Image (cartoon, rainbow, N blue to C red):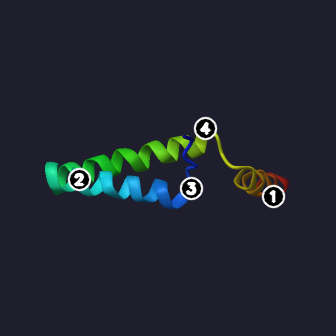
């Protein structure tokens, strides 16, 4: 049986994991993990940006260096 992942399922699983971490580890552990999660997401976007973001970045860099 194959389960189709969509944004609601992923959001529910991530929310459950974050809530469980908050209850078991406390708020400091939760904040540290959220910081690492945000840093990892930022690095992931930087390494493999979506095409719209890549076009926006190139357009603005070209605009800066043309003037």
Disc 4 or 1, which lies upstream in sequence? Answer: 4
Residue 6: assigned label: 3
Residue 63: assigned label: 1
Label 1 crowd bin: few (<14), some (14–19), many (20+), radius 10 Å: few
Tell me the quadrant of the picture where the C terminus can be found: bottom right
- Which residue is the extreme one toward the bottom? 8
For the residues labelled 3 and 1, the Cα–Cα distance comes to 37 Å
Which residue does the image show at 39% across and 53% down from the upper left? 13
Disc 4 or 3, which lies upstream in sequence? Answer: 3
Query: Which is in the foreground here, disc 4 or disc 3?
Result: 3
Residue under numbered circle 4: 47
Query: Which is in the foreground here, disc 2 or disc 1?
Result: 2
Q: Position of residue 38 (x, y in %)?
A: 42, 50
Query: Which is in the foreground here, disc 3 or disc 1?
Result: 3
Tell me the quadrant of the picture where the N terminus can be found: top right
- Which residue is the extreme one toward the front? 1
- Look at the numbered disc 3 and give the secondary structure of its residue: loop
- Which residue is the extreme one toward the right? 66
Instruction: State if disc 1 and disc 2 touch (CB < 8 Å).
Output: no
Residue under numbered circle 2: 20
Disc 3 or 1, which lies upstream in sequence? Answer: 3
Identify whether 45 is placed above or below 67: above
Which residue does the image show at 20% across and 48% down from the upper left? 29
């Amino acid at each position: 049986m194959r389960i189709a992942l969509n944004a609601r399922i992923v959001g529910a699983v991530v929310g459950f994991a974050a809530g469980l971490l908050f209850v078991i580890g406390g708020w400091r552990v939760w904040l540290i993990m959220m910081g690492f999660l945000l840093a990892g997401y930022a690095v992931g976007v930087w390494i493999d940006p979506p095409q719209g973001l890549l076009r926006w970045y190139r357009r603005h860099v070209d605009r800066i260096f043309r003037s």
